[in-house]
Image (cartoon, helix red, strand yellow):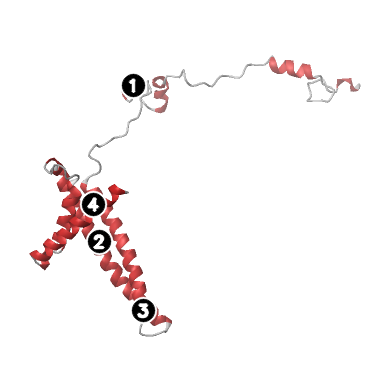
Amino acid sequence: MSNNNLGSGRGGASPYDDDTSSSTSTSAGSPIPDFNASNIQLSTVAPAFGISSSAAAASGLQTRQPDYLDYDQKGRGIFSIMCTNSGISYLVGVTIGGLYGLKEGLARTPSSRWKVKLNSVLNHCGRHGSGLGNMMGASAIMYSLYEGVADSFELDAYTGPIQPPAPLFAGMMTGATYYMRAGPRVAALAGTIGLGAVGGTFALYSVL
């Protein structure tokens, strides 16, 4: 049996095959299909996925429509702002109070033993951290509530050049409400301090 049949192309590739013959056979084959989906009508293929053609047309599958995000010109609601401000204020108060409690616990420990020091630090951190955190969280709730009330009644329309009046009103009412049980004088003083604190903050922010 002759060896001339080797590499004829019928039994597989061979180093004796001609390169031109292989390229010719490849080019003579079927063309690669085009998978461009731009000409596909979605309303036509929608029934294959369990969607009726009318529903596809109603939902805008036939034509591509831009997606718009819901935008509220008034911004977030009062309760959303109140929860955010109270949470942030509480965390800040707990952190500051905890650091102060750590300092006081190490300074006022009655003994140099490790367990006594640890107990003193935990007691002072819990006392000062929770106290300052609760105070700042409650103040943030009242401030957000008063600010939302001022915005809802459009207080800026009656104050003229004093803009924005809502934070100033909220700071004054928060201080007065927080110290209301101490008497009218203390409440008025606390309201004045709150008004000055908010006004000073806005003045510093405008300068910077």
Residue nearest the observer in this picture, 81 or 2: 81
Quarter location, residue 141: bottom left
Q: Give how far apart the Cα atoms at labels 3 and 1 are.
A: 75 Å
Which sits earlier in the primary sequence, circle 2 or circle 4?
4
The three-letter amino acid code for the residue at tag 1 is Ala
The three-letter amino acid code for the residue at tag 4 is Met
Residue 38, image x, y percentages: 47, 20
Residue 12 badge: none
Asked if the residue under mark 3 is in contact with the one under mark 4, i.e. CB atoms within 8 Å, the reply is: no
Residue nearest the observer in this picture, 125 or 158: 158
Question: Circle 1 is placed at which residue position?
Answer: 57
Instruction: Please give the name of the residue rendered at 79% of the width and 25% of the height, measured from the top-left corner.
Output: 13
Of labels 3 and 2, the one closer to you: 3
Q: Is residue 194 rendered to the left or right of residue 20? A: left
Which sits earlier in the primary sequence, circle 3 or circle 2?
3
**Is the residue marked by circle 2 packed among few (<14), some (14-19), or many (20+) residues within 10 Å?**
many
Residue 107 badge: 3
Which sits earlier in the primary sequence, circle 4 or circle 3?
4
Residue 136 badge: 2
Q: Give how far apart the Cα atoms at labels 2 and 4 are.
A: 12 Å
Residue 82 badge: 4
Which residue is situated farthest in the left direction here?
184
Which sits earlier in the primary sequence, circle 4 or circle 1?
1
Of labels 4 and 3, the one closer to you: 3
